[in-house]
């Protein structure tokens, strides 16, 4: 598809967490590669994670004032004022910078810019990463040109008449070097190479996993021979998690954030993770079997619903931390021990995980955006 040579400007709005931001970065990268005359700007909450990763990708960034929907009535006035201020700045930016299209990445950080785009009748594309759409996506869906979903199950939550497309969730590249493709695809470690257990609590880490995974591993330490542990803790808990492993005399690489996920995932053999949509898409692309521990306070329990879809396919086992079935560390140890010891079971789970992958998602969404830009150009 050919676009005219005049510069087009696309804004990706949202972020706050890696689960919202990274799909946008993946799509933006594909769009830039296929559309040399496109300018990309990211707009979001101003959090350091967003600013850092957008700058590393080489895109412009605009921070906007915004707040999530408050839980207390007395906070509602401030919520309205903050989001109105963000909306005004976004509307001025769209007019001044001649924006052609806006992509909403989900979460409250996407709302000011997406609302401003809808008010100006600009093409609006929404990305939904989870099986249960977020409030922002559902609220904006009627005014969107297209909603791209990661799960077919999400479609039932949208109003009739919304233009929906199942694309999968765009993710960062998960590379498998040719020399190690056989080992990674079968989840077999080369001779004398430790197998790798990866602990992922999301871009900000998980207090629950940080506190309980080391204790669970200590209970089954006899099963850890030949295993290497990499634990993404988040910045806040990094030192505490390192001390816990040290106190338990368990060697582990504890890092606040794994930047090189493209190589870390394919080199791993089992994961313990939360169940956000982007995490699951990356696990599927790498064919990495997992113990999923859904975040129990996620809106509409969407992480549990994500995890259930993967569990039904045989790609993972699910541990619900809300179930009153004993201490979390004991239940984790109960799942972990057999999986660490059973190579054949991990291989079967890896194959099921791989069947859920949609590695072309970023490319599919980028082509959809190019199509909408071409439609807008013809209509102008």
Image (cartoon, helix red, strand yellow):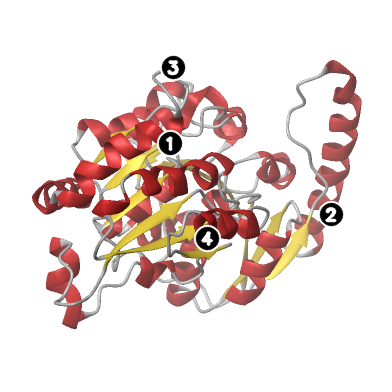
- Give the number of the mark in front: 4 or 1: 4
Q: Residue at x 42, y 53 (%)?
A: 199
- Give the number of the mark in front: 4 or 3: 4
Q: Quadrant of the N terminus?
A: bottom left
Position in image of residue 283 (x %, y %): 33, 53
- Give the number of the mark in front: 2 or 3: 3
Position in image of residue 309 (x %, y %): 29, 32
* Towards the viewer: 49 or 23: 49
**Secondary structure category for the residue under label 4:** helix
Q: Residues within 10 Å of mark 2 (few under 14, many from 20)?
A: few
* Tags 2 and 3 touching, CB below 8 Å: no
Q: Residue at x 49, y 31 (%)?
A: 133
Residue for badge 2: 92
* Towards the viewer: 379 or 71: 71
Q: Which residue is farthest bottom?
A: 179
Q: Residues within 10 Å of mark 1 (few under 14, many from 20)?
A: some
* Tags 4 and 1 touching, CB below 8 Å: no
Residue for badge 4: 246
First in residue order: circle 4 vs circle 1: 4
First in residue order: circle 2 vs circle 4: 2
First in residue order: circle 2 vs circle 3: 2
Left or right: where 171 falls relative to 223 = right
The label shown at residue 329 is 1
> Real-space Cα distance between discs 1 and 2?
51 Å
Q: Residues within 10 Å of mark 4 (few under 14, many from 20)?
A: few
> Real-space Cα distance between discs 4 and 1?
17 Å
**Secondary structure category for the residue under label 3:** loop
- Give the number of the mark in front: 1 or 3: 1
First in residue order: circle 1 vs circle 3: 3
Q: Residue at x 18, y 77 (%)?
A: 192
Residue for badge 3: 324
Q: Is residue 378 visible?
A: no
């Amino acid at each position: 598809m050919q676009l005219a040579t005049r510069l087009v400007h696309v804004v990706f709005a949202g972020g706050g967490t890696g689960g919202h931001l990274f799909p946008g970065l993946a799509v933006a990268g594909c769009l830039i590669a296929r559309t040399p005359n496109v300018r990309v700007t990211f707009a979001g909450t101003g959090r350091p994670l967003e600013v850092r990763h957008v700058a590393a990708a080489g895109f412009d960034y605009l921070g906007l004032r915004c707040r999530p929907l408050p839980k207390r009535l007395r906070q509602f006035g401030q919520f309205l004022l903050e989001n109105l201020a963000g909306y005004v700045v976004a509307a001025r930016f769209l007019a001044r910078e001649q924006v052609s299209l806006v992509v909403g990445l989900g979460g409250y950080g996407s709302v000011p810019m997406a609302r401003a785009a809808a008010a100006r009748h600009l093409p609006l594309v929404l990305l939904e990463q989870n099986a249960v759409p977020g409030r922002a996506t559902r609220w904006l869906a009627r005014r969107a040109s297209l909603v791209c979903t990661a799960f077919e199950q999400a479609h039932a939550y949208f109003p009739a008449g919304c233009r929906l497309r199942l694309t999968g969730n765009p993710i960062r590249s998960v590379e498998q070097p040719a020399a190690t493709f056989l080992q990674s695809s079968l989840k077999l470690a080369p001779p004398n190479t430790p197998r790798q257990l990866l602990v992922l609590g999301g871009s900000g880490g998980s207090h629950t996993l940080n506190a309980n995974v080391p204790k669970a591993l200590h209970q089954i330490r006899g099963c850890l021979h030949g295993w290497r542990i990499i634990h993404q803790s988040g910045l806040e808990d990094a030192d505490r998690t390192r001390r816990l492993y040290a106190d338990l005399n368990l060697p582990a690489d504890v890092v606040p954030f794994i930047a090189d996920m493209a190589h870390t995932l394919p080199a791993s053999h089992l994961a313990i993770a939360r169940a956000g949509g982007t995490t699951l898409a990356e696990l599927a692309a790498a064919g990495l079997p997992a113990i999923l521990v859904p975040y129990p306070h996620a809106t509409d329990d969407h992480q549990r619903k994500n995890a259930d879809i993967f569990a039904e396919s045989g790609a993972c086992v699910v541990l619900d931390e809300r179930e009153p079935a004993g201490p979390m560390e004991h239940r984790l140890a109960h799942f972990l021990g057999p999986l660490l010891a059973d190579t054949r079971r991990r291989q079967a789970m890896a194959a099921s995980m791989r069947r859920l992958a949609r590695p072309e998602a970023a490319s599919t969404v980028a082509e959809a955006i190019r199509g909408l830009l071409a439609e807008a150009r013809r209509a102008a």
